[in-house]
């Protein structure tokens, strides 16, 4: 099967447009807002009492919306981003925890909010600037972030780091802030130092779950999400990404597509951790396939 052709037949306009532009170099040419997934994400986006509720809260929706390239300034998306931003700012009123001289903060929260707000045209908001400045201040010496109060300080959390790096990258793209860019690149260097998924001391796989990409990843780290962030930072051609790229290629099925494995979400309407969108829990997965092809193209594979 022609994987690009399969993506071009998607029912979601955003998927068709991104595949056309990013894989074929042709104009996007699609009305993203007419897609069923986008419409579902925009509907009642602020209905949950907590923006961070898994996975229907505004926090998670705005990340999915910008990954589907909802236009900057779209009123419903901006309203959801405002709702999420207000919750994050409230949490900062209580200060940050410092243990052994290192700030213990879940950088994925601020990172996701920063990235989504920057994509939606809100980078000039002083609160968004405060999130960027906070992430710069809280970055650990190894280039990452961590909220685990019991962590030794030798290594930060890959889970908390990939979204923070993405958020700072998007803030840099929106504002030109080179300190944000440099911090994001430092985080990318952390991933590359570990060849994306390997232990420094043994070379073994740190966590086998990282080898099975999921979509959406939410705050979870895996090789595809790491490679996607590295590609956005311009680092995916580094030879240290080679093991992860090879592993990603090995996961391609005979039909040319990537399949959904274990997912973090449950179907809409489920009692436990539902999403408002059915992203596909088995069989060929559009967003995993699209991102895998994007990454491999950026890496020259």
Image (spheres, rainbow, N blue to C red):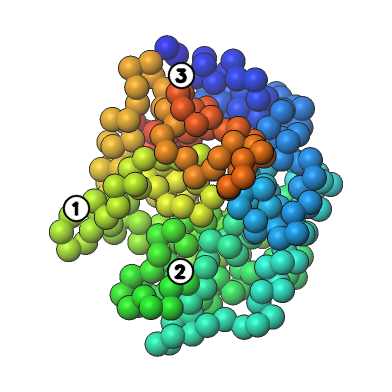
* In front of the other: 162 or 44: 44
Q: Is residue 78 above or below residue 186?
A: above
Q: Between disc 3 and disc 2, whose residue precedes? A: 3
The mark that comes first in sequence, 2 or 1, is 2
Q: Quadrant of residue 110?
A: bottom right
Q: Secondary structure at mark 1?
A: loop
Residue 168, x across and y down, in percent: 56, 61
Name the residue carrying label 1.
Answer: 204
Is residue 252 shown left or right of residue 5? left
At x 47%, y 56%, the residue is 162
Q: Nearer the viewer, residue 220 or 269?
A: 269
Q: Judge from the rendering whether residue 190 lies leftward or rightward of residue 88; answer left or right.
A: left
Label 3–label 2 contact, CB within 8 A: no
Q: CA distance from mark 3 to mark 2?
A: 36 Å
Q: Quadrant of the C terminus?
A: top left
- Residue 243 higher or lower than 9, as above or below: below
Q: Which residue is pictured at 35% across the width and 47% down the height?
A: 210
Tag in front: 3 or 1: 1
- With 204 as the anchor, is 215 left or right in this view? right
Mark pair 3, 1: CA separation = 32 Å
> Could you tell me which residue is drawn at 66 percent across and 74 percent down?
91
Residue labelled with disc 3: 3
Residue closer to the observer: 150 or 16: 150
**Mark 1 surroundings: few (<14), some (14-19) or many (≥20) residues within 10 A:** few
Q: Pointers 3 and 1 in contact (CB under 8 A)?
A: no
- Residue 161 percent coordinates (x, y): 46, 61
The residue nearer to you, when weighing 244 against 56, is 56
Please count the marks in the image.
Answer: 3
């Amino acid at each position: 099967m022609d994987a690009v052709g399969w993506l071009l037949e998607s029912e979601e306009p955003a998927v068709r447009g991104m595949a056309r532009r990013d894989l074929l170099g042709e104009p996007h040419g699609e009305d993203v807002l007419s897609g069923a997934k986008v419409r579902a994400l925009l509907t009642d986006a602020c209905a949950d009492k907590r923006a961070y509720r898994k996975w229907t809260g505004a926090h998670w929706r705005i990340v999915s919306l910008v990954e589907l390239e909802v236009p900057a300034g779209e009123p419903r998306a901006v309203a959801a981003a405002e709702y999420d931003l207000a919750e994050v700012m409230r949490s900062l009123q209580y200060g940050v925890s410092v243990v052994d001289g290192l700030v213990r903060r879940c950088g994925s929260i601020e990172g996701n909010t920063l990235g989504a707000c920057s994509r939606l045209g809100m980078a000039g908001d002083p609160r968004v600037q405060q999130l960027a400045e906070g992430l710069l201040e809280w970055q650990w010496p190894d280039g990452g972030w961590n909220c685990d109060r019991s962590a030794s300080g030798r290594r930060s959390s890959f889970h908390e780091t990939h979204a923070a790096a993405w958020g700072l990258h998007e803030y840099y793209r929106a504002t030109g802030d080179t300190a944000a860019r440099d911090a994001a690149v430092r985080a990318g260097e952390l991933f590359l130092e570990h060849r994306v998924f390997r232990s420094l001391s043994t070379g073994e796989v740190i966590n086998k779950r990282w080898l099975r990409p999921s979509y959406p990843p939410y705050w979870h780290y895996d090789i595809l999400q790491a490679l996607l962030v590295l590609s956005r930072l311009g680092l995916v051609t580094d030879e240290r990404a080679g093991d992860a790229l090879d592993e990603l290629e090995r996961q391609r099925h005979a039909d040319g597509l990537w399949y959904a494995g274990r997912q973090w979400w449950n179907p809409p309407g489920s009692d436990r951790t539902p999403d408002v969108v059915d992203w596909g829990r088995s069989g060929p997965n559009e967003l995993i396939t699209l991102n895998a092809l994007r990454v491999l193209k950026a890496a020259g594979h």
